[in-house]
Image (tube, rainbow, N blue to C red):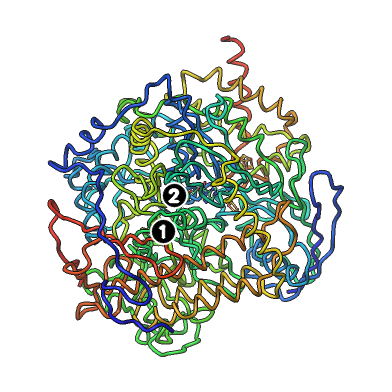
Amino acid sequence: MPETTSLGSGGSAYWTVGDDIADTAAPDGPIETRWDRRKFSAKLVNPANRRKHTVIVVGTGLAGGAAGATLAEQGYNVIQFCFQDSPRRAHSIAAQGGINAAKNYRNDGDSVYRLFYDTVKGGDFRARESNVYRLAQISTQIIDQCVAQGVPFAREYSGLLDTRSFGGVQVQRTFYARGQTGQQLLIGAYQALSRQIDAGNVEIHPRTEMLDLIVIDGRARGIVARDLVTGKITPYLADAVVLATGGYGNVFFLSTNAKGSNTTATWRAHRRGAHFANPCYTQIHPTCIPRSGEYQGKLTLMSESLRNDGRIWVPKTKGDTRSPDQIPEAERDYYLERIYPAFGNLVPRDIASRAAKYQCDDGRGVGPGGLGVYLDFADAIKRMGEDKVREKYGNLFEMYDRITGEDPYKVPMRIYPAVHYTMGGLWVDYDLQSSIPGMFVIGEANFSDHGANRLGASALMQGLADGYFVLPPMLGNYIASTKLGSVSLDDPAVTSVVGEVTGRLGRLLEINGDRTPDSFHRELGELIWDECGMGRTEAGLRKALARIPELREEFWRRVKVPGDSGELNQSLEKANRIADFLEFGELLCIDALHRAESCGGHFREESQTPDGEALRDDEHFAYAAAWEYTGGAPVLHREPLQFDYVHLAQRNYS
Amino acid sequence: MNLTLRIWRQRGPEDRGAMVTYELADVSPDMSFLEMLDVLNERLILEGEDPVAFDHDCREGICGMCGVVINGQAHGPRDRTTTCQLHMREFTDGETIDIEPWRAAAFPVVRDLVVDRSGFDRIIGSGGYISVVTGSAPEAHATPVPKDIADAAFDNATCIGCGACVAACPNGSAMLFTSAKVTHLNLLPQGAPERETRVRDMVATMDDEGFGGCTNTGECTVACPKGIPLTSIGNLNREYLRSLTRR
Ligand SMILES: Cc1cc2nc3c(=O)[nH]c(=O)nc-3n(C[C@H](O)[C@H](O)[C@H](O)COP(=O)(O)OP(=O)(O)OC[C@H]3O[C@@H](n4cnc5c(N)ncnc54)[C@H](O)[C@@H]3O)c2cc1C
Ligand code: SF4
Ligand code: FES
């Protein structure tokens, strides 16, 4: 194991430190007018010329769907990709709770400034003020756009839009469509995109996966993709490339993400020169259905609203295997109510998650493998009556019953935290351009707006803001201000990438070892969950960093991928994604090791307040960490963060 | 529990395909149906066989990617449940389970249990939208929508595009799917300007794509995991007739 010479951000055997970087695209001056001024200074592409420009958009989630539709409406020639069989199935479809917007329809004191303030603070002061302010400004336009598209948001009897509060903020700014907000917003974007596909403005490639990026003369000029049905590998060329490929939560194997969510597009782009920022900022959601056995392939999120009426407890005795109704009141520990009397069961996501982990680590967990805590509605049923509980939570109880076969009206639910969202992602400037000119990154795939922790209902907002409103003018600016030479398919820079991609798939098929791809994914996921999950320590991270390269080596020696590459081969798809997770996982742990402070979703056990709260170290870590790929130890570039409007302060929930 | 699985294996669109029998032991009743297939596939890989190809992604019943015919029923025995949300406790020890792809003229088999549902995308592309260029939308509260209309639109908008309705229909008709979208958009004031062209164009595409006609068997709505009702088809028919009188 390599020896580390120093800790903190000063470099070690695991990484070196390069020059600081700056977001040179962001305007300064009054924050309220920065976005207007940036748009005004942007160069425009003459509408008649737009058809001559081709843009590749990878991904059809909220970010990619919105971007593809909008760019096509503006006249660009769009080529778009997704790995599912239809653009309508992107993972955004699964979002439940809602989308924030500073409409202030309730006259409850909301404003653009308050949404900005809440987001910077919620992100634990690790996001850029300029970006967040713009996001809050655009939020109101998103709701207008979606309503005009026919998104059936919840309404009041007046016919006006209903809103609710979400994620601990004090205003009701969350718009929702029952528990299916993501679905409804995505279908809106998908329909707009479908209209452009039908009009011939977007060439859509479903069941097609981007496997690499083509960079020519330092600029992103295309991608190499595999048709998942025929296996054919094809290079696609363009004037600019947009990645909208979602988050990397599945590096943990078990998460609430869709099974196909992966990091291949972003990781391959990183290997071609795009900095990866803050990978260690991952969000873990406290109320998921625990795993029921070894075979489990994915975890299901249950709305956080359950914590409003459910009481969380574990048996006081370790290893107590009695059924919950056999455990008398005096032998139960309602630990959140005990440790955080002021907030009780409603402490923020990360605190609730960690507390559950500590109970289980300590042997008090319940259910299979002791990885669960009770969320008990018995008192709520006594207090409000079963009908009221049913009215409030009926659909969630039904979902729980369907999955576990247990009736939560009679038996307490079992819950356990699970990975849910990734704040880190490819580094982008204010224009959403990555460190490779001509490659833009939008949605969960970038790192831009949520700092170290995302507030509920803000991912949908960011994806749509990026796709509908921020990317299109900034992409136009790039095209208008850049003189792009022509490239051809037989350019060596193109054929060499095609060769590398083909070679790699061939190697995966040749190994013919004795372990399945999933078995590696599971093992990697468990390691990362244990050492780089809810709580992280220097010793644990070093352990993970020692093990990951071994596992990677083993993967390339022992993985077994049946079939061949010229056909639909789901094992090959998986193995190729896992190979990238095995590289990415190491960067995740390096970032977590280097950031010796706790902030947001990144909890370093060494850095906490006496009552177990995350303790930031603003003096040393008030920066975004942008990592450069070298093939060996990555290079850290710091982008210092400045807070001119929202003043740095520690969180406090006790 | 121990199960006998009879699974449709078909290497590609040109291949004839056949049912192949597999014995699977030690299946936990807490497994989802797809996790059960995962376990089978892990074994097949190690035995050097090609795993069974099937579509899935969210595994939460919302993306619409999964879907197989289980013992003759699209999405299996449980009401209002997608294949990914179905659990093995719905089956009994020693049972034989037949697993087949969606079968419909307009959904050709790609491989094993995977079919091509892109016809649905083309139906939407031909009119299943409201034409609003990004940035041109009026203030959201400019047009209030009565709650009952909004709720009915929402109920129809919950369709996940899985295709079970087509698979369950003896005619392979896409009426339930198409009617859900027409009803969602035509109910809303925002959808009114394109009300006639929408329904005409979508119905025409439905026919062009090779989906069959509707003979009111109602199988679609029984199979639909989202409970899209037959009344939506009635509404589609009314909208269609109305559009013909207003050319
Ligand atoms: C269960 C759950 C509930 C959530 N609830 C909420 C909520 O209530 N509110 C909220 O604001 N946020 C919520 N989120 C977060 C939010 O849903 C996501 O962050 C957001 O939808 C991501 O959108 P996206 O467009 O960036 O990516 P995605 O929707 O993940 O889309 C990624 C796209 O990229 C494509 N793709 C990926 N890789 C490749 C490749 N290599 N080649 C080709 N195509 C590729 C995929 O096919 C897909 O089309 C939730 C998340 C989860 C998991
Ligand atoms: S109508 Fe029902 S069965 Fe048909 S595609 Fe939609 S959700 Fe699936
Ligand atoms: S996998 Fe998404 S609905 Fe079943």
> SS of the residue at dot 2?
loop
Residue positioned 42% across, 52% down in the render: A445
Query: Is any atom of residue B50 visible in this view?
Result: yes
Q: Quadrant where the N terminus of chain A lies?
A: bottom left
Q: Provide residue B164's location: percent of width, then percent of height.
A: 68, 44
A33 to the left or right of A424: left
Which of the 4 image quarters holds residue B89? bottom right
Residue ID for mark 1: A303
Q: Residues within 10 Å of mark 2 (few under 14, many from 20)?
A: some
Query: Please, which chain is the residue tagged with disc 1 on?
Result: A
Whether pointer 2 and pointer 1 mark residues with C-beta atoms closer than 8 Å, the reply is yes
Q: Identify whether A462 is placed above or below B206.
A: below
Q: CA distance from mark 2 to mark 1?
A: 9 Å
Q: Provide residue A286's location: percent of width, then percent of height.
A: 39, 67
Comes first in the chain, label 2 or label 1: 2
Query: Please, which chain is the residue tagged with disc 2 on?
Result: A
Q: Amino acid at mark 2?
A: Gly
Residue ID for mark 2: A179
Residue positioned 61% across, 35% down in the render: B121
